[in-house]
Every structure is written in C-alpha cells, then in structure tokens.
Image (tube, helix red, strand yellow):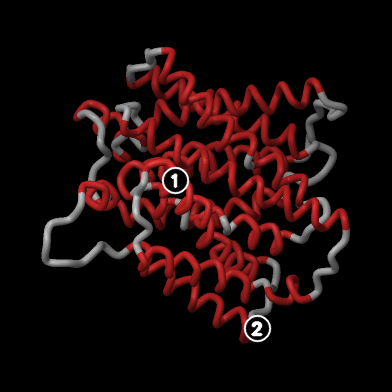
Amino acid sequence: MASVAIFFMTVLIWGSTWIAIKYQSGPVAPEVSVAYRFLGAALVLFLWCGLRQLRLRFCLRDHLFLALQGLCLFCLNYIPLYWASKWLTSGLVAVAFSTVVIFSLLLSRLVHRNPIEPRVGLGACCGVGGLGLIFWPELNGLVLSDLTLIAIGLALLGAFMGSSGTLVGSRNSKAGIPVVQASAFGMLYGGLATAAYVTLSPVTWTWDPAPSYSASLAYLIYFGSVIGFWGFLTVVARMGPERASYIPVLFPVVALAISTLVEGYVWSVEAAIGLALVLSGNFMVLMKSGGSGQKSSSAKDKVDPAPAVTDSAKAEASPSRLSA
C-alpha cells in the first residue's frame, strides 16, 4: 500500500475513534478504559504474531526503546489528555494537541539535526492555524482560570509526549524492529504502565455492562489501536516523524465531518476557512521535495517509499499480511 494511502487511512480511522470514545464515557474511569484498550490491542497483536510466526525476540536495548515508545505513545500522552478533558471542551483539547506537529519538528531538529524544510514548517503552521479557526467559538469563549491553565498545560504535555513517542518509533524502525512487533510490545508496555497507575491510584477498576461500551471498546482496540497505530508507525517509518505528526492535525476535521452527520454540527464561515487551511497545510507537508540536484540523505529518508528495515521486516509489516 502506498505511503500516502496509509497516511489517509490512518487519518480516517483515528478521526472516527472520537465518536467511539464518546460511548466510553460513563461509570468507567478514563484511565481504566485506556488500560483496557491497549492491553486488549497488545493481546490481539501478539496473537497475530504467533499465528504468523513473526519474530518476537529482541535484545535488551531494543526492549528499553520499545518500553519508552509505549510509555510515550500509549500512556503518557493519553492520560494527560483525558485529565485535560475534565476542564476543557474537546475542541480546545484538539487544538492544544495539534501542537504535536510543532513539537515533532523541533525535536527532530534537536535530536537528529534534521533541517526543518520551510514548506513543511509553513504547512504545519497552516494546519494548526486552520484548526484554531475551526474551533474559534470555543477559543473565543475561553475564560482563563487556574484550572484552565493547568488543563492547557496537561494537553500540551500530552502533545509533547506523543511527539516524543513518534521520535522513538522512528528510531525503532531504523533499528530494524518491524512495525507490527513494535506496536505489540509498545502497547503492552504502555498498557501495563497505565494499569500500574490505576492500581496504585485512587481510581477503581470497573466495567460498564452496557453493549455500547463493549462495542466501542472493541472498535477502539481493533481499528483505533491495532490498525490505526500500525498505519501511524508505518508512516513514521516511511515518511518520517515530522510528516506523521501531521496526522493529529488532520483527523479532528474527520471527527467534525462525522459529528456533522451524526450530531448535527453546524459549520461556520471560520470553520470553512479553517478547513481550507488544514487541507492546504496537509498538501504542503505531504508533497515531495523538489529540486534538480541531489537530495540529502535525510531528505531521502523522509520520502523513501519503504521503511529502512530488512526485507523480512518489510514482509512482516506488509498491510496485505496484516489484513489476511
């Protein structure tokens, strides 16, 4: 499957998970639902690895980076966002989390010394600005208070941890760890870390017997986690963490489209202009670099059509095998 196709597949899947997350609200604490989701997704992926006889033995150093990836991507970015949602509307949380693309650009520059392409930087700013216009009514009505400032800080922390996890995922891909196995171990470690937090905190382990809770959890496990993060980490491997981090900027637009059909969301002029900015920024971030001369090795890695892993690893991460 082409890298751009996987990019937009991930956007569509993650954009649809917000309506599923809505059905998770109820007697079960958000942290407990996060633990259920990623431990369940890890189980599915390990069963898949066993059926396909995929390699599961990695050195201690790789496991440490897999644990770091899981802690960042499947624990420390979700819990702060759920906490922030207690004091901020979903739109404000989405705007704050969209800064993940800015964090990713800066971290990539700081850690890997990768130059920030002006086109990618401009596209990222267009996307974040467009998302701000879409949610302008909520931003305009924001009243700053101590709790609000704390919530904004938590949302930004979640965005920073998400971009950090993306950077670690890029390292794991370059180290030759296939995407499926990286997702399995990452979700296991992230789910266990979240479960440990729930166990040691005042939060209580509960279960909602409502069919809507079980159905939405199953959707989040299989589509939102197993397929969604496979697509995301594949984009990280093929297109680089900078472009992959634009996905969280784009999927709120999909969520709004679903909300228009399901919940009667009404589009404003500001929202329409914001959508145009998001799509324009998406085009600038995704299009390949031009130029008649030779490209640098870092630029080549960002648009290389295949992950920098072994041939066997490529076969293990093949979307056709994942969906067989």
Q: Position of residue 265 (x, y in %)?
A: 68, 73
Q: Position of residue 104 (x, y in %)?
A: 48, 50
Give the mark count: 2
Gap in angstroms between the C-alphas marked 1 and 2: 39 Å
> Which amino acid type is shown beneath numbered disc 1?
Leu
Q: How packed is label 2: few (under 14 Cα within 10 Å), some, or many (20 or more)?
A: some
Q: Which residue is mark 1?
A: 110
Residue 289 sits in which quadrant? bottom left
Q: Position of residue 248 (x, y in %)?
A: 53, 55
In the picture, measured across the screen, residue 274 lies left or right of residue 80, that is left
Kindly identify which numbered label has been placed on residue 280. Answer: none
> Which amino acid type is shown beneath numbered disc 2?
Ser
- Residue at x 40% of width, y 57% of height: 8
Q: Is residue 134 above or below residue 300?
A: below
Q: Which residue is mark 2?
A: 268
Q: Secondary structure at mark 1?
A: helix
Q: Is residue 231 above or below residue 268?
A: above
In the picture, measured across the screen, residue 223 lies left or right of residue 29, that is left
- Residue at x 64% of width, y 36% of height: 76
